[in-house]
Structure formats: structure tokens, C-alpha cells
């Protein structure tokens, strides 16, 4: 009886265990929808193509920018070459297509020391009159540039002074007097440093060359006195500084032109 009871209990436990095991949840692999998988795959491919196209566009933009910069640089270099060529043509024209014009070396301003000018007269019947006209042309060459420097210096000076000390009527009066004063002081201090040099053509006409120098220190100081626009030493120095600044610009341009002349001469050797 006891043996039968034990067997019954074992059977009950066995059935109970089997029932519990049958009720334990089983993890199942989700089913894949083929249509949805295809849609997802197409979306991924489209996104990859979009990103690739974006990268390609960026690279193309960068290439175009590099090409544009290169073209701009090449254009600037070409413009510089054209300007240099035009400068040579202008210099040659200024010298009558002759790089070895008499007195040409002495016709360039020297910064801080003097202004210079070249006077040329061609086909003049009288030798003496040719010299006079060439001298006058050289002086006019200097005076026209000097008068421009006075006007610019005066404009800078009047902008610098305080409104209370600025007399507009006096400014206008002095500006109108500039040309007369400029010519007067240039004529006074003009000094021939080369020439007159004469050439005579087959018809007997004379060509004359003259180079003139005008010392800057003398003319600037006398210009200030003649204009009568400045009373104090400090203001005289201020105006003198502005004048020298304008004259320095002209002298630097002349130095560059002279250097170009010498370079062109070397190229002809």
C-alpha cells in the first residue's frame, strides 16, 4: 500500500512538472515583412545617394571656387603685364620715342631736394629763340606740378585747422592766388642743369633740349611767405609738412619712371 502511494505521488509530480513546462512562455523570432524590408532598403539606398550627391556638390563648389580664384589671379597678372607695357609705351611717347633724349637723366625730381623738368622745342628757325622756348617749357612743366602740390597741401592744411581759426573767405582768396604765387617762385629759383642742347634737321630747323632744377627748400618757404596764410611757426611747419608730403608723391613717381627708363635702356643693350 505504501509503495502504491509513493508511485501515485511521483506520477502526480511528473504530470505537474510537465504542465508547468508547457505553460512557460517561449521567445519567438518576429516575422519579417518582405515588403517593408524592401521599402526600408530602398530608403537607405536613397539616403546614401542623397549624401553622396551632397558631397559631390560640395566638392564641385570647392573646385569651382579654386578655379575662379586661379582665373582671377591669372587675370590680375595679365592686367599687371598690360599696365607695365602701357607704362613703357607712355614713357617712350613722353620721350618722343627716344630713350636717349638729351638731358633726360636730369629731368626727374629728386625726393627732398629738387623738382626737375625737361623742356623741348622742335623745328624752330632761330637757335636763340629755341633755347628761350625750351627753357620756358621746362619751367611750365615744373610749375604746373608744383601748383597742384600747393593746392593739395592747402586743402589738407585747412581741413586740419580748427573751425574757429578757419577763415573761408581767406581760403578762397589764397586758392585763387596759388597759380600766380607758384609760377613766381618757380621762375625765381629755376636753374638750368643741362643744355641748351641743339639738334638741326636737314631743313635748318632747330630742336632744343633744356633740363631745369628748382630747390624745394627755397620755394616752399617762399611760397608760405607769399601766400600769407600762416602766422605761427607751428602752423608754418604743419603746412610745410603737407606740401612736402605732396611733393614726395610726385618725386616717388618720377623715381619709378626713371628706374623704368634705365631698365628699358638695359633691355636694348
Image (spheres, helix red, strand yellow):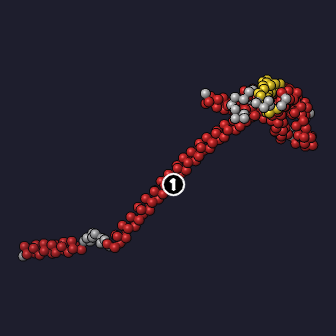
Quadrant of image for the N terminus: bottom left
Q: Is residue 126 above or below residue 155?
A: above
Q: Quadrant of residue 201?
A: top right
Q: Residue at x 70, y 38 (%)?
A: 90
Left or right relative to 107: residue 3: left
Camera-nearest residue between 211 and 98:
98
Residue 149 image offset from top left, x and y in percent:
81, 36
Residue extending farthest to the front is 203
Q: Quadrant of residue 152 in the image?
A: top right
Q: Is residue 115 visible?
A: no
Mark 1 = which residue?
61
Q: Is residue 223 left or right of residue 62?
A: right
Q: Residue at x 79, y 30 (%)?
A: 204
The C terminus - image quarter? top right
Circle 1 residues within 10 Å: few <14, some 14–19, many ≥20 = few
Q: Secondary structure at mark 1?
A: helix
Q: Position of residue 107 (x, y in %)?
A: 75, 29
Question: Could you tell me residue 199's position as x and y percent?
Answer: 76, 27
Q: Tell me what residue is drawn at x 72 percent, y 29 percent.
A: 101
Give the quadrant of residue 258: top right
In the rendered structure, the answer to whether residue 168 lies left or right of residue 13 reads right
x, y percentage for residue 209? 78, 28
Q: Residue at point 69% right, 28% down? A: 100
- Residue placed most toward the observer, 46 or 153: 153
Q: How many marks?
A: 1
In terms of depth relative to the viewer, which is nearer, 115 or 150?
115
Residue toward you, 155 or 180 = 180
In the picture, measured across the screen, residue 34 lies left or right of residue 144, that is left
Whether residue 250 is visible, yes or no, is yes
Amino acid at each position: 500500500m505504501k509503495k502504491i502511494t509513493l508511485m501515485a505521488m511521483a506520477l502526480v509530480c511528473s504530470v505537474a512538472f510537465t504542465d508547468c513546462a508547457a505553460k512557460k512562455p517561449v521567445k519567438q523570432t518576429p516575422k519579417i515583412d518582405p515588403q517593408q524590408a524592401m521599402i526600408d532598403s530602398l530608403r537607405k539606398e536613397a539616403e546614401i545617394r542623397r549624401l553622396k550627391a551632397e558631397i559631390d556638390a560640395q566638392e564641385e563648389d570647392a573646385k569651382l571656387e579654386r578655379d575662379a580664384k586661379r582665373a582671377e589671379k591669372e587675370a590680375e597678372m595679365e592686367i599687371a603685364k598690360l599696365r607695365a607695357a602701357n607704362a613703357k609705351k607712355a614713357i617712350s611717347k613722353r620721350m618722343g620715342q627716344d630713350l636717349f633724349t638729351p638731358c633726360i637723366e636730369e629731368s626727374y625730381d629728386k625726393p627732398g631736394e629738387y623738382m626737375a623738368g625737361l623742356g623741348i622745342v622742335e623745328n624752330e628757325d632761330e637757335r636763340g629763340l629755341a633755347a628761350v622756348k625750351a627753357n620756358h617749357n621746362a619751367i611750365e612743366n615744373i610749375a604746373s606740378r608744383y601748383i597742384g602740390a600747393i593746392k593739395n597741401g592747402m586743402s589738407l592744411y585747412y581741413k586740419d585747422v580748427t573751425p574757429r581759426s578757419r577763415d573761408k573767405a581767406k581760403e578762397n582768396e589764397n586758392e585763387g592766388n596759388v597759380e600766380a604765387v607758384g609760377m613766381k617762385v618757380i621762375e625765381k629759383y629755376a636753374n638750368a642743369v643741362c643744355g641748351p642742347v641743339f639738334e638741326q634737321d636737314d631743313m635748318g630747323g632747330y630742336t632744343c633740349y633744356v633740363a631745369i632744377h628748382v630747390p624745394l627748400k627755397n620755394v616752399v618757404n617762399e611760397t608760405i611767405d607769399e601766400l600769407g596764410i600762416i602766422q605761427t611757426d607751428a602752423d608754418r611747419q604743419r603746412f610745410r609738412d603737407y606740401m612736402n608730403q605732396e611733393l614726395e608723391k610726385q618725386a616717388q613717381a618720377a623715381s619709378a619712371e626713371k628706374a623704368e627708363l634705365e631698365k628699358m635702356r638695359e633691355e636694348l643693350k
